[in-house]
Amino acid sequence: MTQPPPDISDRFALVRNRARARDDNFLHALAREEIELRLAEVNRTFTRPAIVTGHPHLWANMMPDAPLVSDDPLLALEAGAHDLVIHAMALHWASDPVGQMVQARRALCPDGLFLAVLPGGQTLAELRACLAQAEAEICGGLSPRILPMAEIRDLGALLQRAGLALPVADCVSQNVVYRSIDTLFSDLRMMGEQNALAARRRSFTPRAVFTRAAELYAAHFADDAGRLRASYELIFLTGWAPDSSQPRPLRPGSATARLADALGTQETPLSEKIKIPSKD
């Protein structure tokens, strides 16, 4: 019997942090803008959308008729009921992201669209490096502080594992500057993205860790004006529920035209370009 994956998040802490998120949230605003651009490029009108998110107050007015579904381990989605499922800024907290995608696929009608957005692996790379070095110096070891985020190549492969057709993964990067590391921490609180890892340290962290992290940040990632650079990466995942009307790759050897003819060039046999040694 397959064991469920261990919980990476403390759901109570996650819900508490998300409830503190403010409406003027630049990262969610960027995610919404990019999703709207991608939907505008699809030559289709979606009439039965659903949005999976842990931030309903931030996504409620994107599609007024779309039900908002919590990103619980078991999604409250009816099988085959939707032609569009948007997984909005919540997949990075899922203990089983493939399971979330599979449930979304089952909720789609044939040729329905799945579209997800989540922070990618380059997000807050500077902060992670400084906190890790500071904690190692002060405490002699590391504790889970920032959620591990997947790289785009890994997330693209998950679309195929979930059974979605025509998978596409792309990303958008955003660089932000902060006056201080405390301003960065404040921004994360307003996003509802504080530490909610199940394995996080439960005791108070020595203030010296954050003081040292601020020193390292200023030394390595400050611009000429002394402002601190922070990287954010949003990854967008697109896939379709399988349908017989979708384009499929041709069977190898079934081509009826030559590439050389299409390019208007002379075809040169490989044996004339490379001397193939004789077996004699």
Image (cartoon, rainbow, N blue to C red):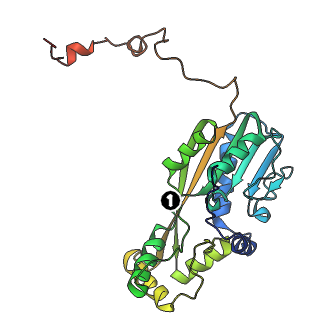
Residue found at x 63% / y 73%: 196
Mark 1, residues whose alpha carbon is within 10 Å: few (<14), some, or many (≥20)?
Answer: some
For this rendering, which residue is in front, 54 or 79? 79
Toward the viewer: 272 or 39? 272
Identified at 63% across, 54% down, the residue is 3
The residue furthest left is 280
Residue placed farthest to the top in the image? 256
Residue 218 in sight in this render? no
Identify residue for label 1. 121
Q: What element carries label 1?
A: loop
Where in the figure is residue 190, as x and y percent of width and height?
A: 67, 75
| Quarter placement of the C terminus | top left
- Measured along the vertical axis of the image, is residue 144 above or below residue 81? below
Work out which residue is located at the far bottom of the displayed protein and give it. Answer: 207
The three-letter amino acid code for the residue at tag 1 is Gly
Report the side of 32 relative to 197 (left or right).
right
Is 30 above or below relative to 102? Answer: below
Residue 11 placed where, x, y %?
71, 69
Residue 32 spot, x, y in % from top left = 69, 55
Q: Where is residue 97 in the image (x, y as percent from the top left)?
A: 63, 53
Residue 59 occupies quadrant: bottom right
